[in-house]
Amino acid sequence: MSVDRRVANLEGDTGLPRKNGELVFDAPWEGRAFGLAVVLNEKGAYTWDDFRSRLVDQVRTGEPHYYENWIRALESLLAAQEIVSPEEVELRAAEYRALKRDPVF
């Protein structure tokens, strides 16, 4: 099954936010987080089932914002795969908060 079909088949609380069948992103970072997770999977960084499992676990924590759960699941998986350390994630987030990085790219 292609990653497109697996993404589209996320169900229940892990199902992607949609309106009239189209994906809904309330902010640019949400679309980038979505795309990053999909591309990293397509490039073989992790299996989609591994990501989905972490997303399910994250949704269970009760965070109401879908893409906050998405990005936390992605960060957790990337750390577990030793692709990015938690310290690197925090450093980059701090750079964005301090406007040392362009928030669009």
Image (cartoon, rainbow, N blue to C red):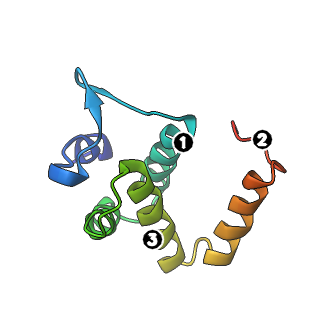
Rounded to the nearest angstrom, the CA distance separating label 3 from label 2 is 25 Å
The spot of residue 80 in percent (x, y) is 48, 79
- Work out whether mark 3 precedes mark 1 in sequence or the reverse, and give the earlier one: 1
Q: Residue at x 56, y 35 (%)?
A: 28
Eye-nearest disc, 3 or 2: 2
Label 1 vs label 2, nearer the camera: 2
Q: Residue furthest right?
A: 100
Q: Nearer the viewer, residue 19 or 44?
A: 19
Residue type at mark 3 is Leu
Query: Where in the figure is residue 91, as x and y percent of width and height?
Result: 74, 68
State whether residue 100 is above or below residue 60: above
Q: Position of residue 36 (x, y in %)?
A: 52, 49
The tag on residue 102 is: 2
Query: Which amino acid is tagged 2?
Result: Asp
Q: Which residue is mark 3?
A: 77
Q: Residue at x 27, y 31 (%)?
A: 18
Q: Nearer the viewer, residue 31 or 35?
A: 31
Q: Residues within 10 Å of mark 3 (few under 14, many from 20)?
A: many
Q: Is residue 57 above or below residue 11?
A: below
Q: CA distance from mark 3 to mark 1?
A: 17 Å
Name the residue beneath numbered marker 1: 32
